[in-house]
Amino acid sequence: MKIEAWFIGKTSPAYLQIGLDDFAGRIKKYVPFETVIIPDIKDAGSYAARDRLLKEGEKVLQKLIPQDYLILLDEGGKEFSSVQFSQFIEKELNKSYKKLIFLVGGSFGFSTELQQRANLKISLSKMTFSHQMVRLFFLEQIYRGFTILNNEPYHNV
């Protein structure tokens, strides 16, 4: 199975992209992994938040196939410790999905249609982070999960 992290829009500032590239490279040592950028909506600022969510959701839904397992990173989602998350990844990798896709949405969240298609929602914290920062935090957690599964010293318990 392949793991993909999907992001709405390009990552900025550049220091975050450097971190994302670093962790993506580390994750690839354990599993086929890719980051996918869903292009921003053109003239997004001219749309109401609801319309922007709908358009972003349509773009994502067009890229999905029924065999994909979609997980939204959402503040109202299920919370895991790092060890629990590593166990979750291990369990999911043994299933028959084509891809395990983690989606970090834009600044307004997700459309109702996208939420209905999602197989699961997870949360990194009860705190609110920018969607740009969440990208880096989440890739670090995927990497941490694989180091836990492989009994490597990155994660100190």
Image: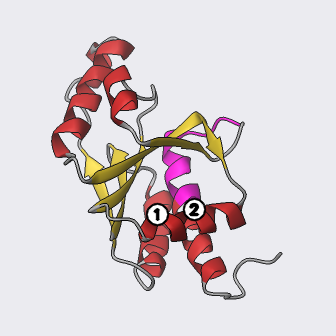
Q: Quadrant of the C terminus?
A: bottom right
Establish if 125 lies above or below 29.
above
Quick check: 2 left or right of 20?
Answer: left
Residue 72, position as x, y percentages in the image: 45, 42
In the image, is residue 55 part of the stretch drawn in magenta?
A: no
Quick one: 8 or 44, which is closer to the camera? 8
Quick check: 3 left or right of 139?
Answer: left
Quick one: 25 or 15, which is closer to the camera? 25
Residue at left offset 55%, top offset 49%? 133
Residue 36, position as x, y percentages in the image: 29, 56
Residue at left offset 63%, top offset 47%? 124
Residue at left offset 22%, top offset 47%? 66
Q: How is the image coloured?
A: secondary structure
Establish if 49 lies above or below 89.
above
Dot 2 lies on which element? helix
In the image, is residue 131 part of the stretch drawn in magenta?
A: yes
Dot 1 lies on which element? helix
Quick one: 102 or 69, which is closer to the camera? 69
Q: Would you call the spot at circle 2 few (<14 residues within 10 Å), some (14-19), or many (20 or more)?
A: few
Q: Quadrant of the N terminus?
A: bottom left
Question: In terms of image quadrants, where is residue 125?
Answer: top right
Residue 122, position as x, y percentages in the image: 56, 44
Q: Badge 1 is on which residue?
A: 92
What amino acid is found at the position of numbered circle 2 in the picture?
Answer: Phe
What amino acid is found at the position of numbered circle 1 in the picture?
Answer: Glu
Q: Would you call the spot at circle 1 few (<14 residues within 10 Å), some (14-19), or many (20 or more)?
A: some
Q: Which mark is drawn over residue 38?
A: none
Look at the image and give the residue range highlighted in magenta. 127-138
| Mark 1 → mark 2, Cα distance in angstroms | 6 Å
Q: Badge 2 is on which residue?
A: 88
Quick check: 99 left or right of 131?
Answer: left
